[in-house]
Image (cartoon, rainbow, N blue to C red):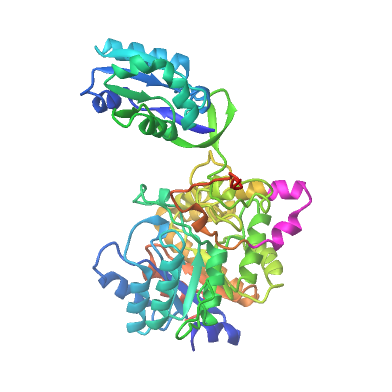
């Protein structure tokens, strides 16, 4: 069952994330792909995340396909103009990629090529419209394509943005522009997330809650202080602290698994997107603890 | 106005090391407000050059350095000084420098400033960028605040995920353009308009360089 079919079937869907390597050595990436194979419904391949130059997302997607894992192509607007984006979308489709996640992309100032010229010729809402056009056999200028795409296109949303309403207005624009699924920024407060879902359920889109595994109380504090749109509640920080250094990661895995279980059992959203960030190895264990394997 | 900043003096001296005598041209408009092309700036640079053993044959602040014909007329009074000068230094923006390049085809012309941006003066000698001359104004759709310029990504349809507590992911010193737009539209009771308004990708052909414009009416033939 494809990612799209899984979401349509009402199954609680699980996606994970793999960052292509900085370099040409793909052994570790293949190891992670193999590890996730059969355990998740699809795997996102990040697009030079945090504006750090790496192997492109498309190569990661193609390698995933070769290993029998369904990829989600993350596509940011930071590095390519409208010609480059459309061209890469056509190429991705020809190579077998069927899911695309349209994002604006972290600014170059966050990355390791700070002098790069940021592109942003399009942004996420416009890129979604472009995918919709390609799906309908036209490029964004209305020119006919010889063979159209049939992408399942998604976008991201930050349920804990502050202020929230500008983010929700953009969310609605993304829905109108053709987004069919959303993967959220990391959430930790399930009660607050329920409020967001109450709102999001008014729209004909599937929502996967973003989860970032907490490794320690220090990491939780870092997320609170430095990562926009992420709020780790104080009681989770206390729980990690109480676990002590040696048990912190184990507790972090438990928190993640507990959240997955609750999201699924209470039917809060349509699935989860696990961002393990360097701990891809732990994803199967989290899913086991959550009762999904 | 065009915001300019003095080049590093050592860099300037390196650029002009092969010349001995200089005529300095400022500008009474933007560069005077920026303190880079005023009478005082000319005086200051004159002294600095002299202390490096250079000769200054004269200096002048034209009314509008980017106006070619007006500047040409004003500089006629300095014909003799200009004739005995090795090199002309222009203390305004890149446009002013290129006025001098046009007026003095046989003389080397060097800029003393870097031209930065089209800016608003917020306080004395404090400037910020609010318009990037994109050639296709969308202020009518964004509550009068330009996201093309004041959002580092130039986003047209709302804030990115990097917005935190109303400021930009690039720097906490930058307020999020889209939060500002949202707040203003809310104040003006225009949130519905903002919600409905999906802006298409900009047509950058309007900003294709070099740009030129003539608003002269064609003279009727007698």
Q: How many marks?
A: 0
Image coordinates of residue B113 in percent, x first then y, are: 39, 28
Q: Measuring 61% from the left and 55% from the top, which residue is drawn there?
A: A161
| Of residues A59 and A183, the one drawn nearer to the viewer in this rendering | A59
Query: Is residue B188 shown in magenta?
Result: yes
**Residue A67: in sight, yes or no?**
no
Query: Is residue B62 shown in magenta?
Result: no
Residue that extends furthest to the left in the rendered view of this protein: B18
> Is A113 on the left-hand or right-hand side of A286?
left
Image coordinates of residue B215 in percent, x first then y, are: 58, 45
- What secondary structure is the stretch in magenta mostly built from? helix
| Of residues B204 and A53, the one drawn nearer to the viewer in this rendering | B204
| Of residues A258 and B36, the one drawn nearer to the viewer in this rendering | B36
Image coordinates of residue A280 in percent, x first then y, are: 38, 68
Residue that extends furthest to the right in the rendered view of this protein: B189
- Seen in the picture, residue A206 relative to A162 is either above or below; the reply is below
Give the image quarter of residue B36.
top left
- Seen in the picture, residue B77 relative to B146 is either above or below; the reply is above
Q: Measuring 57% from the left and 22% from the top, which residue is drawn there?
A: B124
**Residue B4: in sight, yes or no?**
yes
Residue that extends furthest to the bottom in the rendered view of this protein: A1
Q: Measuring 26% from the left and 14% from the top, which residue is drawn there?
A: B54
> Is B82 on the left-hand or right-hand side of A172?
left
- Seen in the picture, residue B44 relative to A21 is either above or below; the reply is above
Residues shaded magenta: B182-198
Image coordinates of residue A224 in percent, x first then y, are: 53, 50
């Amino acid at each position: 069952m494809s990612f799209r079919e899984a979401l349509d079937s009402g199954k609680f869907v699980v996606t994970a994330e793999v960052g292509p390597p900085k370099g040409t050595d793909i052994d570790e990436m293949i190891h992670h792909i193999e590890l996730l194979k059969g355990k998740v419904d699809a795997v996102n391949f990040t697009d030079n995340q945090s504006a750090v130059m790496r192997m492109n997302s498309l190569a990661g997607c193609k390698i995933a396909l070769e290993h029998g894992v369904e990829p989600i192509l993350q596509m940011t607007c930071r590095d390519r103009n409208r010609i480059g984006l459309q061209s890469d979308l056509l190429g991705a489709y020809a190579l077998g990629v069927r899911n695309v996640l349209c994002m604006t992309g972290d600014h170059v100032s966050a990355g390791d090529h700070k002098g790069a010229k940021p592109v942003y010729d399009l942004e996420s809402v416009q890129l979604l419209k472009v995918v919709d056009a390609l799906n309908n056999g036209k490029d964004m200028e209305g020119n006919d394509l010889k063979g159209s795409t049939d992408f399942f296109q998604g976008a991201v949303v930050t349920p804990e943005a502050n202020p929230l309403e500008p983010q929700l207005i953009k969310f609605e624009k993304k829905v109108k522009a053709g987004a069919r699924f959303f993967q959220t920024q990391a959430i930790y407060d399930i009660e607050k997330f329920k409020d967001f879902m109450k709102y999001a359920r008014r729209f004909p889109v599937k929502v996967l809650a973003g989860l970032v595994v907490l490794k320690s109380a220090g990491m939780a504090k870092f997320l609170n202080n430095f990562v926009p749109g992420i709020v780790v509640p104080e009681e989770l920080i206390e729980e990690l602290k109480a676990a002590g250094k040696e048990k912190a990661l184990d507790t972090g895995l438990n928190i993640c698994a507990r959240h997955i279980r609750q999201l699924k059992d209470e039917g809060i959203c349509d699935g989860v997107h696990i961002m393990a960030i360097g701990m891809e190895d732990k994803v199967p264990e989290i899913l086991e603890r959550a009762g999904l394997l | 106005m065009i915001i300019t900043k003095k080049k590093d003096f050592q860099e300037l001296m390196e650029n002009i090391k092969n010349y001995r005598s200089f005529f300095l041209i400022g500008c009474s408009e933007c560069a005077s407000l920026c303190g880079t092309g005023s009478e005082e700036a000319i005086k200051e640079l004159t002294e600095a050059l002299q202390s490096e053993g250079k000769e200054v044959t004269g200096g002048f602040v034209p009314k509008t350095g980017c106006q070619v014909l007006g500047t040409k007329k004003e500089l006629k009074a300095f014909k003799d000084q200009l004739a005995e000068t090795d090199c002309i230094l222009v203390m305004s923006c890149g446009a002013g420098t290129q006025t001098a390049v046009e007026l003095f085809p046989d003389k080397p012309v060097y800029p003393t400033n870097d031209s930065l941006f089209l800016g608003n003066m917020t306080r004395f000698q404090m400037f910020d960028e609010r318009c990037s001359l994109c050639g296709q104004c969308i202020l009518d759709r964004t509550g009068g605040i330009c996201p093309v310029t004041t959002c580092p990504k130039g986003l047209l349809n709302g804030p990115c995920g990097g917005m935190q507590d109303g400021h930009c992911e690039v720097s906490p010193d930058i307020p999020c353009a889209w939060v500002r737009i949202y707040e203003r539209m809310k104040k003006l009771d225009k949130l519905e308009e903002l919600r409905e308004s999906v802006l298409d990708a900009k047509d950058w052909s309007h900003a294709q360089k070099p740009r030129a414009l003539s608003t002269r009416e064609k003279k009727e033939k007698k």
